[in-house]
Structures are given as structure tokens and as C-alpha cells.
Image (spheres, coloured by chain):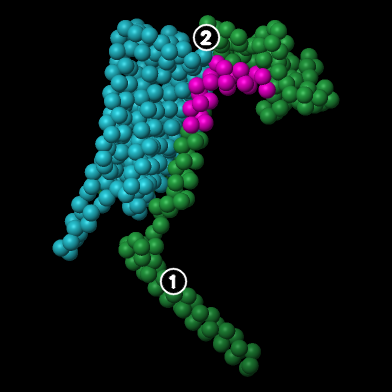
Amino acid sequence: MVMDFVTLGGNLLGTIPLGDIVLYITPFNLFLFAVLLGFTVLIALSKPETQIEATMHKLNNTEVKVGPKEFKQRRFLSIICGIASAGAMITGDLFNFTLFMALVGILNIGIVSAVKQTTVLNSAFNYGLIAMMCSLPLFGGASIILASTGTLSLAVLSQMPASPMVVFGAILMLIGILGESGVAPFFASKAEMFRTAGSPFIVIIHLSSLFIIVRAVEILLLVLW
Amino acid sequence: MRLGVLWNKLADPKNIPRLFAFSLGIILIVGLIVPMALNPDQLYTRPAPQVQVDEGLAIAPYDRGGEVLKAPGIINPQYPENAAELGMITGYMSPLAQWISSVSPYFGTSIYSSPGGLVDEILYYTRGFDTILESSILMMSFIIASWLSINYTMNRKNDEKEIKADVKKAINDSTQVANEVKANDVKARSKQLRRDN
């Protein structure tokens, strides 16, 4: 059986043609897209949380607050991050998806880099190293699949049988996605990034990786089956 | 090694890039034994290697034919219905490029000298959305970098832990230097003593 849009996401509701890159909408993709956009609107409207940190061996508590400058920068980057991950939900092109993925990765580092806590920045730096390395498997995987099938369109790829080279390209893409979205066993640097104040902005980092993983599973099924 | 020790190592952000690089390396090495087969039916067509060079075309291997705004060149879209005017500027070259290609037979051998129209049609017409995304990635990284250079969040001058570590390191370093000086002193003195005798 061939996995295509209909078996994975339900009836094709429509396409958005942009030259060779055709975005497509099924109930599944539309749901993911709408949830992410809705969450992005919530982030744009909400105010960040403040954390109270207890101090060891002392009686005073320190308040970790998000300053106005930091708030503006992180809100801006979070909104772009939400839109980018929403775009990744409906894209119908392999290379386009990897670009969205790279954009989400750099925005995740950006959201955290505005924090003034050195432990958080240290793990953001380590995540940045992984994100840099990920560009090789992400784009390399997509280009290997392009070389062995001659196309990048998911609609065409889903109808093609998978050759060993396509499987290798898909595995490369998978490790790129795992590293970029911080799934186990590469979770530690990304998980440590969350340990700071400013909840809604931190949550979009988490949410974008979760949604992209779900979407990546769909794309890999389309390519491989 | 006990499993718990391994899990604890996995929880340290410092080890993660190394682990990732290692697993990526393993996969790339495995990739060397995967049978590679190039599909000749490519979306972005190119003639077989050396064919255009043997024919003696001035812009080999990038000659896709076509006359600017008159006849379409050889270029394949995935969805022809979305790119009706494709191929009309495939053969475009700037006056400078035209002059070089008339003088030199090697004009087409490097990507920066390839006919501008061909690249433009892929970058800005059939795959224009990718180009928008690429430049927005660049823009976002510039925004982040410029914000960081103004606000300098990495400033560790007032970080207590860093100060403690620095002081410890300074003490160690200075004792080390003192020891070295002492050893050198003894060495020089014994040398001098030998010379005097």
C-alpha cells in the first residue's frame, strides 16, 4: 500500500501553489497549522511569567523577571517562530520543510539568547553547536533524496518506491530533525534552555519541536512508503 | 560502567554536541556502503558530463538554449501549470558575461559565471518561496546577533560562580608560575656554579 496524503491526513482540502513548491491542506495538516497559529496569537497577547528563586542557606528570595527590552525581543522572535513552525505544517516540499526546520532552530536559540543567565546561555550555546551540525544531515538528506528520485515534491515522492539511497537520505534527515528539535538522546542541551523565566516564549520552543516531530513522521512516511 | 552513570552523562548539555557529532559520523560512514544511484530523470535537468564541452559550446556545461523573451530554454518545472512563462530568460547573460564567454571557452565552468537567467528562474520563479525562507533565516540571525552585540547577555563579570572559578584558577596559575620560576632559578644557579668551578 502506498502512503499518500489521503491515507495519512484525510481528504485533500486544497493546495496553495507557489511555483514548484505546492503547499497542501488536509484536515490533519490544517489542524496542526491552526493550533500553532492560535498559540502564536496567544503569545503575542500575553505577558511573561515571573519566577521566584529560593536561595540556599539564605533567607532572601530572588525574583527572576523579564525586562522590557528582553520582553520585546523574545516576543518578536517567538511570534516568528510560531509562524515558521505553522508554515512547516502545511508545506508540500521536502527542501522547503528543511528550511522551515532550520529557521525554527535559529529562532529557538534567539529566544533563549536574550536571557541573562549564564547557565541557560551555556546550554543554548551547546544547542547552537548541534543546530549548526544539523544543517549537514538536513540539507544533505534532502539533496540525496532529490538526486535519487529527481524530485522534491511530496506529492510525487509519495507515489515513488523507496530505493536504498532514499532510505539513507531519510535517515540523514531524521537525525537532523532529532538533533534540531532536541529529542532523546539529544535532549539535555535543549531541556536546560527552558530553565528560565518568561513562560509563553519558552513554551513555543517546546511546542514547535513537538509539532515538527509529528510533521516529520508524516513526511518520512510519505517518502519511504 | 553502570547505566546510571551513562544517563547522568547524557543529562549534561556539554556532552550532547559530542554525542550528536559521533552518531552523525557513524551514519555518514554507514552511508559510504549504501548503493548510490543517480536518477537520470531529474527535475532540474542537466546534460551528461562533458557533452557540451565536446561540442565546444561557449558556456558549457550551462548552455540550456533559448532566446531571451522570445523562445523558452530547456528547463523543467515540477508543476508546469504554475510556471507558464518559464524558460523565457534562461539564456540571459549580462553584457560583461557575454563578452567573457566570447573570449574564453571556460566561462561556464564555475557557478558564479553561469548564465544569470538560469539561476534566476529556479531561485526566483519555480522555487521562489525557498529563497524567501533562506533570506529570512539570514535576517533572523542578523537580528539575534545585533541584539546580542548591543545588550551583551553573555557578560559574566558579575557572575559569582565565574568569579569563584576565576579566582581558583588564578591562584593555581600563580603557584604554578612561582614553582616554575623556582625550578628555573635552581637550574640557572647550578649551571653558574658549574661554570665557576
Read off the magenta span: B116-136
Left or right, residue B188 beside residue A34: right
In-front residue for pair B137/B24:
B137
Q: Nearer the viewer, mark 2 or mark 1?
A: 2
Seen in the picture, residue A2 relative to A124 is either above or below; the reply is: above
- Magenta stretch: residue A74 in it? no
Dot 1 amino acid type? Asp
Residue corresponding to mark 2: B82
Q: Which chain is green?
A: B
- Magenta stretch: residue B124 in it? yes
Would you identify the image quadrant in which residue A39 lies?
top left
Q: Residue at x 39, y 59 (%)?
A: B156
Q: Residue at x 59, y 19 (%)?
A: B122
Residue corresponding to mark 1: B173
Write down the chain letter for disc 1. B
Left or right, residue B44 beside residue B95: left
In-front residue for pair B129/B102:
B129
Left or right, residue B22 beside residue A35: right
Determine if residue A68 is in view. Answer: yes
Seen in the picture, residue B162 relative to B82 is either above or below; the reply is: below
In-front residue for pair A171/A87:
A87
